[in-house]
Each structure stands twice: as C-alpha cells, then as structure tokens.
Amino acid sequence: MKNIWQWIRRELIHIFHELNPRSRKKAAQWEDTDGTDFFMRIGIKKEDVVMDFGCGPGRFCIPAAKLVGAYGKVYAVDKNIRILKKVLRKANDLGLQNLRTICSLTELAPRPKDRMFKFILLYDMLHFLDLPERKELYAALHSILAENGVLSVNIKHVKTDNPSKYFTTMTTEDVVREIETAGYCLSQKHSIKVWHAHDMVDGIIWNFVKRQ
C-alpha cells in the first residue's frame, strides 16, 4: 500500500509540473539552451553517436540530439512505450530527425566500429535496477561503447539521497566502485548543474572509459 501511495504522489507531482507554466518554462529553457551547454561541458560533440538509457520524458536525449546535429545520432532507450511515443513526437515537432527511440538494447542492429557509441548516458536511473540487472547492463553497454567512448553516469537515490530500495545501503562511492569492477575506469568527475525531476540542481557527473 505504501508503494501505491508513493506512486500516486509522484504522478500528482509530475502532473502539477507538466501543467505549471513556471515549470514548463524551466524545462523548455533546459532543452533549448542549458541542456546543450551542459553536454558540451561534459564532452559531447557534433556528429557523436549517443545513447540515453532510461531516457524518461526526454530531458537529456532532446538537447543531446540538438547538439550532435544532423550527422550525429541519439538513441533514446526506455521500456515505457507511452513515454517513448511522447519523446519521438517532441523530437519530430522540433525537426530532430537524428533521434531514434527503442525499448531495449536487443533492437540495436550490429554496429560498425566507426559508429559505436561515443557517449552512453546513465542519468538518474541505476536505482531502478537490482544488482544482477545492473551488472548485466554494464556488460551489455561495454560491448557497444566505442574504444574511446564515455559511459556518463549521474548517480541518485543512494542512502543519503532519498534512497531507493536497491540503494538503501549504498553510497555514491559504492556505485562508482561497482562500475569500475565491471570493466570501466573513472576518467572525469564534473561538478555541474544538471536537470533532476523538475529543475536544475547541483550534481556530479561521473565519466568512465573502458578499462585498458
């Protein structure tokens, strides 16, 4: 029953912000300018191939698609088909023909080495997965990340940050070590304003590369 009420509360908050003019203005500014500035600072460039895994309503894949341009590509991945339809509709309304939506990694065709993913985003989503699911994800992404590519992670809802059920005993550093043991090496740590829920907040982006 507690989980049901938490879900209802989250949905009501989401609906409020979807209808609130001030919240809508903030989201539009993020997708128009602040988001592209954010991605430039963490290292995404024009013509990059990017994946936003667990994309939700598209707060990251939309500005990423704007930044990489017509010769780049962004894949928005989410198991919620209804959300993906909204993301694709928004991308089409904005004339972003370089954004593709998929429900799972199994929908990806085999990729030539020169079109492997330069950036894969795991932003505010790892807490939805249990440990075996996270390990499986790290391994799957390792196989499609370019040799000089970046696994970019925003870790939320650990034990000191409104913890989720899978992160109740974990710290941010625990999650970082977990990713490193999966074949990655931490290369950069960005303290930066990032979108979370319904506004820009102070956050940390952890960029990993494949372990050599």
Image (tube, grey):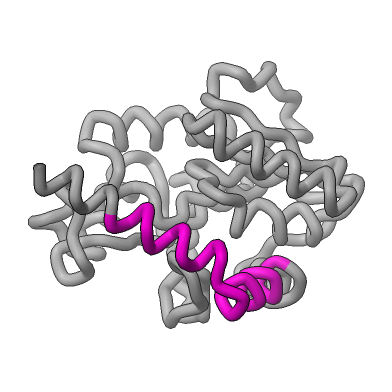
> Which of the pair 111/100 is nearer the observer?
100
> Residue 100: horizontal and vertical position, in percent?
73, 35
**Residue 129 falls inside the magenta stretch:** no
Vertical placement of residue 110 versus 204, above or below = above
As drawn, 91 above or below 130: below
Q: Horizontal and vertical percent for residue 36?
A: 72, 69
Does 18 lie within the magenta span? yes
* Residue 2 sits above or below residue 80 on the image: below
What x and y, as percent, mark residue 94? 84, 53
Q: Residue at x 49, y 32 (%)?
A: 80
In-image side of 206 versus 38 (left or right): left
Q: Relative to 192, is 116 above or below?
A: above
Q: Position of residue 47 (x, y in %)?
A: 84, 51
Q: Residue at x 56, y 50 (%)?
A: 57
Q: Most prominent secondary structure in the magenta stretch? A: helix
Q: Quadrant of the N terminus?
A: top left
Q: Which residues are magenta?
A: 9-31
Q: Quadrant of residue 27?
A: bottom right
